[in-house]
Image (tube, rainbow, N blue to C red):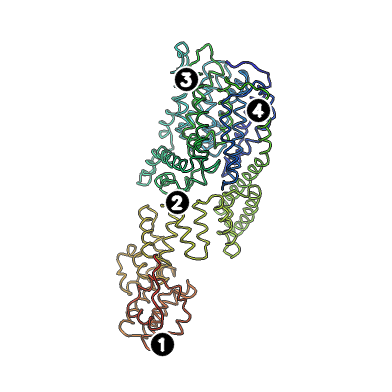
Amino acid sequence: MMQERSDRTSWLALLLLIPSAGLALPGLLGADPLPHAAGTGWALLFLLPAACLLPFCLGRGLPKSALLFLPHLALLALAADSSTDTFELQRAAILLALSIASFLAGSALSARAMLLFQRGAILVSLGFTLQALFATVSDGSTGAVGPLGNTGALSQVALPGAVLGAVFALRGPLLFRGLGALAALAFGVHAGTTPVLTGALAFAIALGAWVVLAPTEARSHRWRALAFAAVAPLCFLLAPVIESPTSTQAAPSEAVDSTATDSDLGGVEVRLRIWNRSLRMAFDHALTGVGPGQFRASFPPYRDPKEIELSTYQHHSEVGGEVEHAHSDWVQAFAEFGVIGGLAFCALLVLVARSALRACRQSGEEFGPHSALGPVCLALLINSTQHAPLSFEPAPLVLAWVLFGASLQSTRTTSSRGAVWIGLCVAAALFLSLTTALRLVSHGEHLAKRQLAAARYGDKLLSSSADSRIFSSEFWLEEGRLLRDALEAAPDSTTALSLQAARYATWTNTASSRSDARKAWERVLVHRPHQVSALIGLGLLAEDDDSRRALWNRAIELDPGHPTTLENLARLESLHGSPERAFEYIDRLRTAGHLDDELLSDLGARVLLAGRTRIGTELLSNLYPEFDLNRPEDWFALSEAESQRGGRSLLSDGLKATAHRLWGLENLASGEFGFAQSKLRQALKLSRIYLPNGDLPTRLLLIASYEISGDTARARLELEELERESILPEDWHELPESVTNALQRLGLQAPARTGL
């Protein structure tokens, strides 16, 4: 049993509840696109009062297990110069300081203080789950995210209080028996209806272990706790029954069925694949790991393509575009801290597990706060195998490490003076991190305001009949101000930089804005060298085709099925590169289900206007099977049909230009040079609407027609205006032999193949 100490530890227990309870405040993080970042800053601010009291509560020494944090501190210091994602490095440093402070504080709590803390954790759990359930009832949907903006994070912070609630519901004052039962029931309902299966399993397994491991005389009353464990599975089974009629009577489709199957099985498979590749990354950085907070920046080259498909629902959703953490604290420790840090972390958790199992075996006479530590620590440990409540999410982190510290307080070092000095150092580290914490909070507030402004802008566009340009200019100015403020608070925020780059690239098309967008994307890649969205964005702004190709090839290596990258590469190769590669990318889009008629017609039209008839024919042949696309008459008829359907368009002009080009080739082959030149000039006139100088293949045909007809002077004059270096080998070899011979007589040689 824990021995009573000064009442100051009771005050410490109450102060330790503030970080998690504070993050439950409505509106604090709900609109923030990065709630874990701002939440880390808020958690430190909320923990500062407890940090002031901490050194005065460590008079009896520290647990020897606290020494296992030393490798992490050393590796954090080593990572300062080698880390690329400095934003996440600073956040990881704060989280480590919070973990150590909470662990030491938990080890200092008396039995009375521990009881206060556990009762407070029950109230914290209720605060989170009741908000989420109320939102579920009020908007008529399931899976409400609550004040943290994430159902998984909410489940993690509510889990300790729910387990403690199930334990306290069996004995103790009537008030806390009722609150405990309510917390356990609320957690079960939320976990079952959302659903959050890992939280429900951790809850059930921990309570089951508490019952099974109990001495015979204690088992008679503990078994009743299993009733709470059945709530989540029951709600999970009943959820489809209580859904609205419109959702249950929706017409089935292959897409819906496929998504449902992936959703049911994807969570387990996704985690297994992430763990496998995370351990590969850890093996490649065995000694020191990739560095604290560097998982997201370092993991993309190791991602499993199948995991990407599952996480993004076959690339039909932006969710899962990046992996923030390893979805397991145990794996995360090896990935970021290497073998030494990983083993130290796992050793600490093993000690907690051993202590928790011992607490579960205590008899009924010993029932109390220490006995309750058994199931709650087991639940946290089980949850940590599937999530990151101990190393990534700030809301559950303080609760978890306080409870872990309390479970390991029996074995202590002998120097109480040294413990006090260590407490002072930890408190000083937290206060030294105050500036960083304030920057994280300010950064999150500005991003949240930008998110709300974007929502208001969208609503105005939908609901107002006023000129949309008024709203656009208002949002442009407001967004610019908010992003500048966010970057002033956190200049290394890749999220704010990405939004800034997209803003410059989307809203204006001046040389200055493109330059600003390019600089912003380059800054993103400095911090996260493998971010696919940055590679795509930078490729769109590149000055030449080779640079675009290199950037997009890097992106496709990281995510082989990314539809935007595949589409960009298909366009690039169709217009300026290898037709074979273009069709390879098109086939990959078709296989993945991302190739539609609109994309095919747009790409086909642009290819035709670029004079690449063979590629355009292959692209459009499946869209117009009733036409013979080898005959210029059919191309012309098709262009007329398109014009009648939707007026003059890119596609109708591309079809008509191709008809004139093919007629010109027929006239040239039959020796009707005047007609050939007239048709080719008409084709060139249409392509010049979209290309400043017109398409190159038609210009080559026109020059050759002058040479063949004997007008060599005019042919040479036209040739002087031609950019010879822009002739692609594929375009040259598609020309008729009579044309290439005429061009060679003029001194134009076949371009060398570059391996495209």
Name the amino acid type tagged 2.
Leu
Name the amino acid type tagged 1.
Thr
The answer to whether the residues at label 2 and label 3 have Cβ atoms under 8 Å apart is no
Residue marked by disc 4: 15
The answer to whether the residues at label 3 and label 4 have Cβ atoms under 8 Å apart is no
Residue 455 percent location from the top left of the image: 57, 49
Q: Decide: few, some or many residues near mark 3? Use Cα within 10 Å; few <14, some 14-19, many ≥20.
A: many
The alpha-carbon separation of the residues under discs 2 and 3 comes to 45 Å
Residue 714 percent location from the top left of the image: 44, 86
Residue 225 percent location from the top left of the image: 47, 20
Residue marked by disc 2: 558
Q: Is residue 498 above or below residue 665?
A: above
The alpha-carbon separation of the residues under discs 3 and 4 comes to 29 Å
Name the amino acid type tagged 3.
Trp
Residue marked by disc 3: 210
Q: Earlier in the sequence, mark 1 or mark 4?
A: 4
Q: Earlier in the sequence, mark 3 or mark 1?
A: 3
Nearer-the-camera pick, 740 or 455: 740
Residue 524 appearing in the image: yes
Q: How many marks?
A: 4
- Quick one: SS at disc 1? helix
Residue marked by disc 1: 712
Residue 253 percent location from the top left of the image: 35, 46
Q: Earlier in the sequence, mark 2 or mark 4?
A: 4
The alpha-carbon separation of the residues under discs 2 and 4 comes to 45 Å
Nearer-the-camera pick, 663 or 471: 663
